[in-house]
Image (cartoon, rainbow, N blue to C red):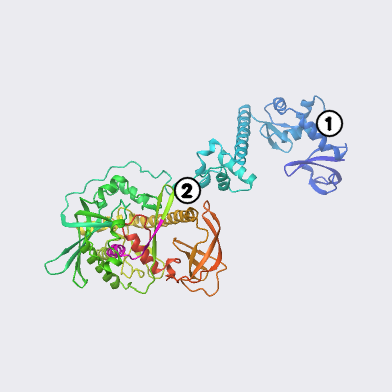
Amino acid sequence: MNVFYEEDGGFKVGAVMSSTDASLQVEAPHGKRSKIKTAHVLLKFTSPLADFLPQAETAAADIDVDFLWECCGADEFQFEALAADYWGHAPSAIEAAAIALRLHGAPMYFYRKGRGHYKAAPEDTLKAALAGQEKRRQQQLQIDEWAAQLRAGNIPEALRSQLMTLLHRPDKNTLEWKALDAASRDANQPPLRLVAAAGGIPSVPDYLLAGFLMEHFPKGRGFSAYAPAQAPGELVDAGVQAFSIDDAATTEIDDAFSLTRLDNGNWRVGVHIAAPTLGIGVDSELEKLVYNRLSTVYFPGDKITMLPDDAVNAFTLKEGQHCPAVSMYLEVAPDFTVLSHESRVEQVFVAANLRHDTLEPLFNEDTLANDPGVDYPYKAELRWLWEFANALEVRRGKADPTRPPQLDYNFAIEDGKVIITRRKRGAPMDKLVSELMILVNCEWGGELDRAGFPAIYRAQTQGKVKMVTTAQPHVGLGVAQYAWSSSPLRRAVDFVNQRQLVAMIRGEPAAFPPGDARLYAILRDFDAAYSAYNQFQDQMERFWCLRWFTQEGVSEPIATYVKEDLVRIDGLPMATRLSGLPDGLQAGDKVRLAIVRIDELTLDIEYRVLGRLDGAAPEPVALDDAVDNVADIEAASMAEALSATDGAAS
């Protein structure tokens, strides 16, 4: 005797070898023996075992499932009873098995109610299920069509407008992603490569920017609706002529300076910081924008400002205007000793916006050492302030004439061409700005701490720099505390600290009292955002460095050895680790490299070491200029960030 039985969600047949009331020992057509429960048996038959299932499956394939559904009625039924109705006679074992197979294979039409028992799906439910099945079939046809176009090197129109989303933040349930994924798997290429090969990435910078915006500016780089900033109330005029020092492209001018000779022979140095907090109300939409964006984003050729243009224009320290400011005045002796300082909230007349490109040829180390007799605006003030800055650097314990020079790099994009220029870090105009910014950020941080006003500080006590809400030393800068307060148009931390400063100066309650959870939230969010923004800037600068190689036809760049397997590419802010460097290299030695491969899309570059460049004068190398964000790097990069130069990052 043979049996037709159900097991593991399917149907099988076997010859009975032995049996009990509860179980059977059966042998399958291929010889395997197994023990099954008697309750699992649906049919017993004597026809040949080997041909039974193939014949039943053939018969089942000829059964019209729609007709079968119409035959079964609304009540639960047993498959053999339906087989009798369908065939019109007592069914053979093969005919009954065919019905069982057909019922089991059409779960939308028939609901399983137990072993061998079924119930027809209600008509409305069946129609909905069939419509869904047809929809899925049509969707799969669409997926297959799009995938075929992609494999052929064409981007379907339906995908073209969604490419950046598909590549950066895909919804893997969409048909568009499924088509791209299928084509990618078939072509054995990552989606990015497939899209690029089809011409879908005409601009790598635009591709990188799109990913950044989706992650950090999902609503776009524009600003939501907000009420314009209100003009601050009547402010006392400072009675000074202030000037700023900035890059030519700077629009967010945060800081300016003034210098006045006092009757007692001392000097009064004014450091004037733009004061957007005087016109941006607490809990206003503009303030929410500040705490949402957290910082201006800089990258070669462009920037995304923290504040909208009209708010920037209302508070930037623009030439020829009286501007709201939070000022620190320092009384300085002729030997550059700081005798006292005081802070004020006032309006300052900005007499000039000095720009790097026109100032540096006149105000630099050479002209300071050998005065050519050429006059230029604020020459006397600039020379005095530079000498004062040198004295401040000595006082911080950071003056080191033996320290090898470090370089800063500026990027400009003109008609798709990158121009990379170098400037020695610590140039007079940079040192002037950075030292005064370090001074006021230190002193204001101390004042806030002594007054019991919480603030956000940069601290460094054991290597790594961190952000905290209590005054702690910054060893890298050589100061007792350091509260970013000098860039309120560009950084939310400075904006917050200025709120506290204004309240302290005016004798008002702190905007953020001790223990205020909002302060910790802003600190946390700013730290994450600022890091992400700097990473994006680094990513974009790396792309333009790679583009520079191709643009300038450089195939064998020169590199300066730093240490171990680390070299720095001359003329570019790029460092890389290489195997195969010559033995015996000393820091500053030159090596020639060959560029093997540049992949702008993935920002990869591969070099081969050609050998030592004999006869080249070793270049002084500051080891921390190319590696590890250690204390002195923090100090140097901080100084650059504290200048009002657009694009600087610490």
Residue 473 screen position, x and y as percent: 33, 69
Residue type, label 1:
Ser
- How packed mark 2 is, by other alpha carbons closer than 10 Å (few <14, some 14-19, many 20 or more), is some
In the rendered image, which quarter is residue 454 located in?
bottom left
Q: Is residue 466 above or below residue 323?
A: below
Q: Nearer the viewer, mark 2 or mark 1?
A: 2
**Is residue 507 something that shows in the picture?**
no
Residue numbers of the magenta segment: 420-437
Q: CA distance from mark 2 to mark 1?
A: 66 Å
Residue to which mark 2 is pinned: 211
Residue 458 screen position, x and y as percent: 35, 63
**Is residue 563 something that shows in the picture?**
yes
Q: Is residue 421 magenta?
A: yes
Q: Is residue 93 above or below residue 168?
A: above
Q: Nearer the viewer, residue 18 or 305?
A: 305
In the rendered image, which quarter is residue 626 located in?
bottom left
Residue to which mark 1 is pinned: 92
- Which residue sits furthest left? 263
**Helix, strand or loop status at disc 1:** loop
**Helix, strand or loop status at disc 2:** helix
Q: Is residue 257 left or right of residue 132?
A: left
Q: Residue at x 72, y 36 (%)?
A: 104
